[in-house]
Image (cartoon, grey):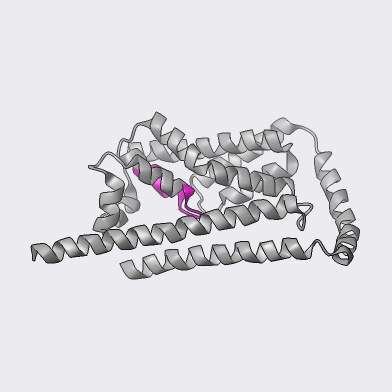
Amino acid sequence: MRKIDKKLYIKFSGTLLLLLAGIFCCLLAVMQIEELNRWYETWQQQLVRMEEQIASMGNRGLIVLIVMLLFTLKSVFPPVTIPAICLISGMVLPWYFALLVNIAGVAWLMTIRYFWGKRFGGGSTIKLVRQNEIVQSLLEHNGTGNPYMLFVFRLIPAFPVNSISRLYGAMQFRYRDYILISLGGFMFKILSYTIIGRNVFNPLSASFLLPIILFSFISGSILIGLYYVLDATENNRNSKTEKKG
């Protein structure tokens, strides 16, 4: 895929997320209509019974162990997704406890991949980075890893957690700074996924829709901003090249 295609993909994804935020805003407004609310309350009774059955599940320790095992599995099997794991814990655990479990799980996942990269190198990810001079200069930061880009990568929705973690491990980036920056950038997503999971049995409520709206809006804005940053960086580099030529 060419550079321009990657940039356009980022812009398209950001626009799509902003559009999604608008759609959910409209849905939230529509649900204020009294007739729709009455219909929804009837349907929601079945969801409440399902929630009660799940809440009655005992042995929280076993649930926490399963969630942590899922995060471990994610470190070697990318199709397992962080949002899905966070939603599961949000569904079956009290939200404040689920939030702590999800933070611990994400930190564990990032730690596994960091030390994997430190031990075995960056693998195919570092080869892809070196194919693009702009990305390489922004990311490697004289070979030691750019802390600001790490924070940005953690903010970007659907950006591969495993690859970036391994890459920063391979660059020997200081672990304490790595994990603090990573969790700081990822915290908004963990909180959003957990709250959505907590309210998944009330899918047309403000408690469920507002986190989705905020997540879509903020994520879309970040992607649009990233597009313009990459575009400006590329244009600046091209103009310098032309002057030298």
Q: Is residue 150 above or below residue 59?
A: below
Q: Which quarter of the figure is the C terminus placed in? A: bottom left
Q: Considering depth in this image, is 161 or 188 the residue closer to the camera?
A: 188
* Residue at x 88%, y 63% (from the top left corner): 34
Q: In the image, 19: left or right of 63?
A: left
- The residues colored magenta run 155-167
Q: x and y percent of residue 168 in the render?
A: 35, 41
Q: Is residue 71 above or below residue 21?
A: above
**Horizontal arrangement in the rendering, residue 7 relative to residue 108 (left or right):** left
Q: Position of residue 53 (x, y in %)?
A: 85, 45
Q: Residue 237: x and y, percent? A: 21, 60
In the rendered image, residue 243 lying in the magenta stretch gets the answer: no
Residue beneath the point at 60% across and 50% down: 83
Q: Which residue is rendered at x = 48% and y = 48% of the image?
A: 155
Q: Position of residue 189 (x, y in %)?
A: 56, 47
Q: Dividing the image into 4 quarters, which one contains the N terminus?
A: bottom left
Q: Is residue 51 visible?
A: yes
Name the dominant secondary structure of the magenta segment. helix
